[in-house]
Image (cartoon, rainbow, N blue to C red):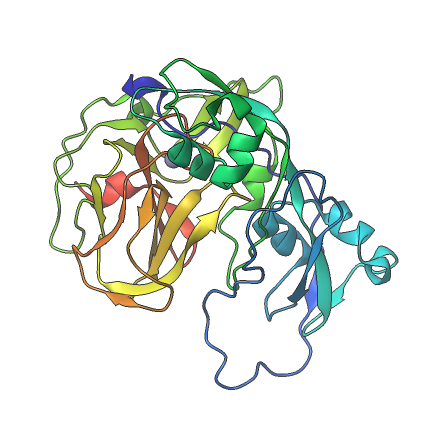
Amino acid sequence: MPSSVGETGGGVPRVSPLVVYARGIVRKGVVAGVRRLVLGGVLLCGAAGAATPYRVQAGDTLLGIALRAGVSVSAIRAVNPALRASSTVQLGRVIQIPDRSAPATTHTVTAGQNLTVIARKYGLTLTQLVRANPKYASGRPVPAGARLSIPARQVPVYLTTGRDTVAPAAARPAARSTRVVTTPAATARSASPRSSAAWLWPVTGYTTVSSGFGGRTLEGEGEQHYGIDIVAPVGTPVRAARAGRVLESRPDYQRGWGWTVVIEHPDGWITRYAHLSANLTKQGEWVVRGQPIGRVGDTGRSTGPHLHFGTYLRWNPRDPMSLYR
Ligand SMILES: [Zn+2]
């Protein structure tokens, strides 16, 4: 059912902006790019209170750090006593970013899903998923329609350097009185996009867009959707829309992207590919236009197999469909 495929609404913390005083000079040789802070796997339920050090970068704000980490400013303050009485953080200072808990939930198995796929979707190890569902410990397959317990868990914290990928406007839920208008693109069933000289359509042969760019309503909440959702089967190759350098290739459960790739292109454009079942490139690599960089999946905050494709010009979100007309 294409119309139901997309992301589920995510909680972006509502926080107030604080300014970072950038003192000193950025060290020569520091390149803009991804700084992975925590490489550790998913922690078991109950490992509360974990935090990850982060060195404040030029251009950071506490709000930006919080948004990127998927936690609130107050949560950061709670584990950084020095920030409680201060409205600023200094460049180069190391602060602690608290891990975020994801609540327990259930998952209804769909046709073709196995435990490995489902574990990956929620950022769990197979062992953790089986422990919560002991009837499948024998290795017997999970039937479609079966309901699995997804235990409460700590999701890994990653922070990237550079500009926020979530605009502050997205942190403000639509007022109750505001009617969220679904964009025309959101209802397009077959947009018939085609590649242009510059931009290659990232999933060859699949053109159904289940959710377009802009305001939309998910689970009763209004939110901004900074990209388009292209429906395609799990495993379909995802190709780089343009040549560029890989900024991120990693799981990002904090922000609901699941396995995601972000590519920086030479002229200020950035593309994001999310909810992947496999990543086929590494951070720092250069990729050519059309190179397979991942496979379509259903990982992270996603309600069915699709590619979330986001395009940004210097991190300002742009409607990908405007690039394929
Ligand atoms: Zn999406």
Instruction: Give me the residue at 72% from left, 51% from top.
Output: 50
* Quadrant (top left/top right/bottom left/bottom right) for the C terminus: top left
- Ligand 1 located in image quadrant: top left
x and y percent of residue 268 in the render? 34, 63
Q: Nearer the viewer, residue 112 or 321?
A: 112
Instruction: Give me the residue at 73% from left, 63% from top.
Output: 95
How many discs appear? 0
Most extreme residue toward the front, as rendered? 138
Task: Report if residue 300 is visible in the image.
Answer: no
Instruction: Give me the residue at 82% from left, 59% from top.
Output: 83
- Picture layout, residue 314 above or below residue 284: above
Q: Nearer the viewer, residue 171 or 108?
A: 108
x and y percent of residue 160 in the render? 52, 60
Direction from residue 261 to residue 50 in the image, left or right: right
x and y percent of residue 269 in the render? 32, 58
Most extreme residue toward the bottom, as rendered? 28
Image quarter for residue 262?
Answer: bottom left
- Picture layout, residue 19 above or below residue 14: below
x and y percent of residue 253 in the render? 51, 43
Q: Nearer the viewer, residue 19 or 43?
A: 43
Instruction: Give me the residue at 17% from left, 58% from top.
Output: 289
* Quadrant (top left/top right/bottom left/bottom right) for the N terminus: top left
Task: Report if residue 22 is visible in the image.
Answer: yes
- Picture layout, residue 192 above or below residue 62: above
